[in-house]
Amino acid sequence: MKALQGVEGQLEWSERPAPTCGEGQIRIRVAAAGLNRADLLQRAGLYPPPPGVTDILGLECAGVVAEAGPASRWKVGDRVCALLAGGGMAEEVVVDERHALPIPPGLSLVEAAAVPEVYATAWLNLFCLAGLQPGEKVLLHAGASGVGSAGIQLCKAFGNPCWVSVGSADRLAYCESLGAQGGVLRGDGLEALRDFAPFDVVLDPVGAKYAQLNLQLLGQDARWVIIGLMGGREANLDLARLLTKRISIIGSTLRSRSADSKARLMADLEQKVWPLFGQGKLSPRLERSYPIRDVEAAFAALASNTVSGKLALVIDPSLA
């Protein structure tokens, strides 16, 4: 099969051995794969896959089941999307059958390829780890990103007013169209977020650069969930403020979680989140898809930090 690798910073669409399909796994013929910032980091050599995971890029995909065991809930021909630790940007991928879900109602395979990673990330961190309750206020940094787009929609669907930080007025308008109450532009400074504080939960892919501000913006018994380090890894914190506000800091990654943990997360999504797609309350927010031959353009677009929502790579247009 052909698959996409990041080799010394370069992308290579080349032949690789097809993975074997074992007990409890399914083989998916890939129609499309979602593109995430983690793929940019892995290509640059900054985010290697966990031990035992393929070095093929791609943390989510959608396609058609090509092989399944006799006791599987899936059968050949089923249309599915899947959360992956790697390997989605390939003609075929083998995945734990518990990490696959039916295509959300009303979505194409290409749209569905842009759903598992960001909705799993947003749901895990906002509702599972932070324990978000109806009515609590949320701040989403990088609100127009894929995770931010999912987070805004989930907050609206579950009764949580949210605000965002973004890079441009167009992206702020985009977030507001999804349901954000408002927000600020990074270039204007983030101090204006004080007007909307205190927040009960901050979802933070930035890290050190926003650390002191986050402590000021968070309220009593608030939760600060760190999911990325785009703004650095080391920060000086006022621990007295942390103590007096009883703030919880939660560090979170999805990719390295155990297979059982991911299975529980996907089951939760299927029960509580997937029906909302059919009700029109959630959407993949796919800004654009690219054929695999234009993969360099797709990676450049994501790296430009101008994308609102998600990008996808079409691997097999005959399925898409």
Image (spheres, grey):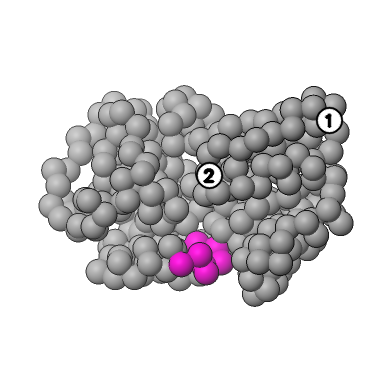
Whole-Å distance between the Cαs marked 2 and 1? 24 Å
Give the crowd class for mark 1: few <14, some 14-19, many >=20 residues within 10 Å: some
Side (left or right) of 277 relative to 297: right
Residue furthest front as drawn: 236
Q: Is residue 116 magenta?
A: no
2 or 1: tag closer to the N-terminus: 2
Q: Nearer the viewer, mark 2 or mark 1?
A: 2
Q: Which residue is mark 1?
A: 245
Dot 1 falls on a residue whose secondary structure is helix
Q: Position of residue 141 (x, y in %)?
A: 65, 53
Residue 181 is situated, as x and y percent measured from the top left of the image, at: 80, 61
- On the picture, is 236 further left or further right than 258? right
Q: Position of residue 194 (x, y in %)?
A: 83, 53
Vertical position of residue 20 compared to residue 304: above or below: above
Q: Residue at x 51, y 53 (%)?
A: 115
User: For mark 2, what is the residue?
Assistant: 232
Q: Residue furthest bottom?
A: 170
Span of residues in magenta:
304-311
Disc assigned to residue 24: none
Badge 2 vs badge 1, beta-carbon distance below 8 Å: no
Q: Is residue 210 above or below residue 243?
A: below
Give the image location of residue 182, x and y in percent: 78, 63
- Residue at image coords 20%, 57%: 12
Amino acid type, callout 1: Lys
- Under mark 2, the amino acid is Gly
